[in-house]
Amino acid sequence: MVVRHGSDKGKAGVGVPLEPFLHQVGGHLSVLRYDAYTVCKPLIFQEQKFYESLPLAMRRFTPQYKGTITVHLRRDSRGHLGLVANPLKENLEPFQVSPESRAVALWQTLQQTTSSEGSPCPLAQMAHSLKESAAKALLRSDCHLSTQASPLVESAVGSQIERKGFNPWGLHCHQAHLSRLCSQYPEDKRHRFLLLENVVSQYKQPCILDLKMGTRQHGDDASEEKKARHMKKCAQSTSACLGVRICGMQVYQTDKKSFLCKDKYYGRKLSVEGFRQALSQFLHDGIRLRTELLEPILRRLQALLTVIRSQSSYRFYSSSLLIIYDGEPPQTAPAPQTTQGSTSGSTSGDPAKVDVRMIDFAHTTYKGSWNERTTYEGPDPGYIFGLENLIGILRDIQEGE
């Protein structure tokens, strides 16, 4: 059920502290954890309208839309800056965050780091005092990210980094977002966020592949400068020749009990063969290739392809596709007795739990969308091209080619 929010007024002082979503593997906007089953992200009107007019056939392939909510900056008793959402109307009691929360602990570590070197100011104020952009200050603070909270991403030269329980990209985006809000708006300003289903809530160790789909990534409203920039990225990556490129991923390694994380900069550098190898790595748990995942993933992708082919006028520019499975090793059933009294091990018969979801619709256009200046006929050829190539490569992996 979609919950609509107006002013989201609640009791004074009541709010839901928003944690960085530690399973965000791609994108540039910060995704935040509202509760175990809900995430939120900055509201973009075009994306909100897409969710509110979503074709029925596409709903199984997108996160459930839960409405919007008001968010504002707040400092805690120790001066740490964070984002707080007014609670849902049916839950007006204060939302308590466990002191053991990894997201809170990691973010507070970052806050302490940015204020411990001779200045009590948060990152955005530090950037302002040095007359540089928050983004540049964030880049300068990368050493804090790696030395204090230890969220290391795979480097451009290809070294592989494992992290124990979180992906660094979400913290990276959250730090940049907080810095931008601090530098551009007063602390008491209210911001609107979308509330969306947390599509990995059911997974113990969610393995996530974020794929940027299509041969074109700029929206119809892009400036000439932005258009040229995105066209160059596509031309220099697998977006041009395959219609799909890796935007980020995390893979649980059962042998090391940690996540292998890769980011969008890694994905941009891949050749076609490198893309194939990366897909294989996404399905490898550090011990073996999870071949049992391929058939259910392919079934979902083929079903999505059928749906996309039926959506006339839609262009999913700059949207992403998530492929998700559980990296938790399958449970082994008790070994049954054979006729000779010996035992033989077997894996429990639960089918592999996988999912495929489309996300990020800020630049999606269709007949009846906010921008009527440009309309298209037929389904999205670039998205279909990317899906067909993705399905073909996964089938090659399945057949051992």
Image (cartoon, helix red, strand yellow):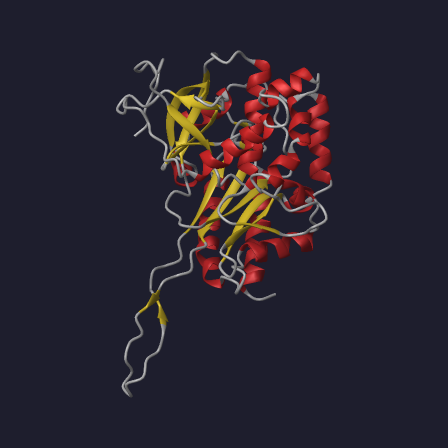
Determine whether 15 is above or below 348 in the image.
Answer: above
- Residue extending farthest to the front is 118
Determine whether 62 is above or below 259 in the image.
Answer: above
Residue at x-position 50% and y-position 41%: 309
Nearest the eye: 66 or 79: 79
Which x, y percent locates residue 55? 41, 32
> Could you say which quadrant of the image residue 282 lies in?
bottom right
Which x, y percent locates residue 83? 46, 23
Q: Say whether residue 369 is visible.
A: no
Quadrant position of the C terminus in the picture: bottom right
Determine whether 42 is above or below 148 in the image.
Answer: above
From the viewer's perspective, is 179 left or right of 323?
A: right
Residue at x-position 36% and y-position 62%: 331
> Could you say which quadrant of the image residue 373 lies in?
top right
> Could you say which quadrant of the image residue 95 lies in?
top left
Residue at x-position 31% and y-position 74%: 335
Nearest the eye: 128 or 36: 128
Which x, y percent locates residue 280? 58, 58
Determine whether 159 is above or below 99 in the image.
Answer: below
Residue at x-position 66% and y-position 20%: 127
Quadrant position of the N terminus in the picture: top left
From the viewer's perspective, is 237 left or right of 355?
A: right
